[in-house]
Amino acid sequence: MAAFISTAAGVGLLLVIIYDVYATVLHSSARYGPIGERLDRGVWGAAREVAFKLSRKGRHKFLNFVGPFMLPLLLLIYILLLIVAFALIYYPHLADDFTATGEAVGRGFDESLYFSGMTLTTLGYGDITPRTGAMRFVAVFESAVGLISITLAITYLLTIYGALERKRTSALALYHQAGEGADAAGLIAHHYVEGQFYGLRDALSAATRDLQSLLESHVEHPVIHYFHPPEVYKSLPRMLFLLLESCSLIRTSLDSEENSDLRNYPEVRTLEASARHVLGELLLSLDIERRQRPRRETPAEAEEDDERWLRRYRQSVERLNRAGIATRRDLNAGWEEYRAQRQEWESKLQRLSLHLGYDWEEITGDRDLDYAADEEKEEPQEEG
């Protein structure tokens, strides 16, 4: 009976590991296996609790180590669990079905772990060998699992770091267009030269493609969520803010006659729809909507939001005017439209930013654009 329980436990654990590897590494899904999901969320949750007690610079440096730590940790846990699973299968048969060089094989579980580890890693010292057909088959199967695991681990690491490189490249393109900060109006003005817009449609199309590619990477490999760049401009929340804010400004602040073609660009509508879709999918993947339900704002908080948005809208309009871009004559109507759009996506993006370790002000720079552009600057004080 003990032999049956040990073997069944080993086979059951092996099946759980195989499913987790399939769901986490091989299957393109926003959700991953129970082992990987619990590990990543547990480690990230604990790291965030510590990080937000540190300074801004210290928080980003600390969280920057978490993703590179979780990735090899998950692979190590897979290896250790595989060793234990096969050791449970070998353990009841150790004394009768194995031979050892120089002395008899003991009955301890440590010998089973030793043989399983040597077999999985394909070291094969030869001091313990199976002598029955069934155990030889299991040993060969474990060696194959070990080789497959090594291949998958290398491929997985290359895929993850390739996706992270593409993310940094996309973020850097936006960074230079947006005045090296969170200046969405600057991003629009960057493409306005001698009274005309140049290359803006191509830039919006490229941003849409980059967003869709980044979403696929995050869906296929959710561990990418937890790679926290210390440079805020390389973060996905900053990218989403710049693109959503740019679309809002184009649609609400530009003159409807002189810039009617730009306001009606299909590239603007497509980018806005893509950015909102990506934001929704990320919230779903990280289960933020359920675990961080938005709290009801007090009237004072709602008024503070309105003041912050109005200040940002006026600053953006002034920035566009300085660049020579014709803006809306009826700014009050434009402000009301802008306010409605910020209300639609801000709370969602704010929760995503907080979950990923960024405070809202450093993402948007609504109170101080210099704070969003300067990674070393101290947090601005509240007015009043």
Image (cartoon, grey):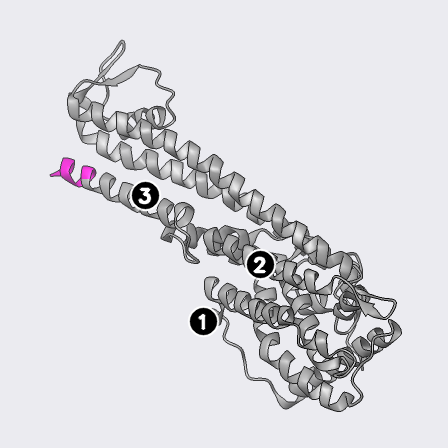
Kind of residue at badge 3: Ile
Tell me the CA gap for discs 2 and 1.
18 Å
**Residue assigned mark 2:** 48
Quarter of the picture containing the C terminus is bottom right
Kind of residue at badge 2: Arg
Where 148 falls versus 195 (above or below)?
above
Give the mark nearer the N terminus: 1 vs 3.
3
The location of residue 353, given as percent across then percent down, is 61, 65
**Residue found farthest to the left:** 1
Region of the chain picked out in magenta, as a range: 1-7
Q: Point out the frontmost of discs 2 and 1.
A: 1
Secondary structure of the residue carrying tag 3 is helix
Tell me the CA gap for discs 3 and 2.
30 Å
Residue 290 marker: 1
Give the mark nearer the N terminus: 2 vs 1.
2
Residue 18 marker: 3
The location of residue 36, given as percent across then percent down, is 42, 50
Contact between labelled residues 2 and 3, with CB atoms less than 8 Å apart: no
Contact between labelled residues 3 and 1, with CB atoms less than 8 Å apart: no
